[in-house]
Amino acid sequence: MNKTVDINGVTTAYMEEGNGIPVVLMHGWGQNKEMMIHVFDHLKDRFRVVSLDFPGFGESGLPPEAWGVIEYEKFFEQFLETIGIDRVILIGHSFGCRVAIRFAAENPQRVIRMVLTGAAGIRPKHDLKWHIATKTYKLGKFVLKITGQKGRLQELQKNAGSEDYRNAVGIMKPTFVKVVNDDIAPLLHSVTCPVLLVWGDLDTAAPLWMGQQMEKEMKDAGLAVFEGDDHWAYWHQSDRFNAVIDVFVKEDEQA
């Protein structure tokens, strides 16, 4: 069933069905609750399943200002409180995992277990080529600004950054910058619940080494690798993904 709720002035859209232990599905950047529909439909007969649109995505309203992961996590806390969820199982993809990890680290007593797939959040170490390109871009932007070349400046900014950054509009552009600059690595040791990590070994958005680091630093984590797949492995191999979830959450399901 599709629902909406107001969280501090932000209209938040979500789907909810089923009974039992709550499971909340947390989509990736630029996506929406529909991207988790295969998991939603698979679990709704055994759990109370909720899938939300984060502010700025899907049918939810925009954040009132540029948010980072910290603001999204505080929003998520309020969302759970508003719809009456205390302890929860979290299933997230990419950006949703950033929020899930921060929530689990700060609220260890509230998270029963987590499934994280293609989890973003660890800031990569960049090579010399990246640093040179970044400094060249900043220098070029500075020169075009002080020389008043607005047209060329707009063109430079239009073509800079990742596809997600270029696609972001309005308040979501500075929001994206704040989100990707957040580093959840220092929080990994504070995640104490059981964690299932699912990764495509060809993932370039969140490379496999990130999953391996999470498995190593989280207290109770295991890594399942989907060979030959990418950042969207959970979507491409939805039946396989649901099967590994079933094993992981079996003791929590409604009889």
Image (cartoon, helix red, strand yellow):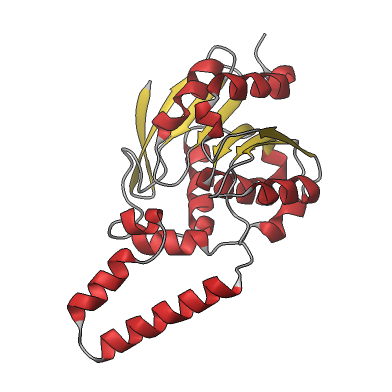
- The residue under the point 51% across, 28% down is 236
Residue 84 visible in the shown view:
yes
Q: Position of residue 35 (x, y in %)?
A: 43, 31
Q: Nearer the viewer, residue 254 or 125?
A: 125
- The residue under the point 55% across, 33% down is 233
Residue 168 visible in the shown view:
no
Q: Position of residue 6 (x, y in %)?
A: 36, 41
Q: Nearer the viewer, residue 104 or 27?
A: 27
Q: Quadrant of the C terminus?
A: top right
Q: Is residue 101 left or right of residue 194?
A: left
Q: Is residue 8 left or right of residue 249?
A: left
- The residue under the point 63% across, 38% down is 199
Q: Nearer the viewer, residue 189 or 120?
A: 120
Q: Position of residue 117 (x, y in %)?
A: 60, 38
Farthest bottom residue in view? 147
- The residue under the point 24% across, 70% down is 155
Classify 212 as above or below 181.
Answer: above
| Quarter of the view holding residue 226 | top right
Q: Is residue 31 left or right of residue 70?
A: left
- The image shows a total of numbered marks equal to 0
Q: Nearer the viewer, residue 64 or 166?
A: 166
| Quarter of the view holding residue 220 | top right
Farthest top residue in view? 255
Classify 163 as above or below 52.
Answer: below
Q: Quadrant of the N terminus?
A: top left
Q: Position of residue 96 (x, y in %)?
A: 52, 44
| Quarter of the view holding residue 154 | bottom left
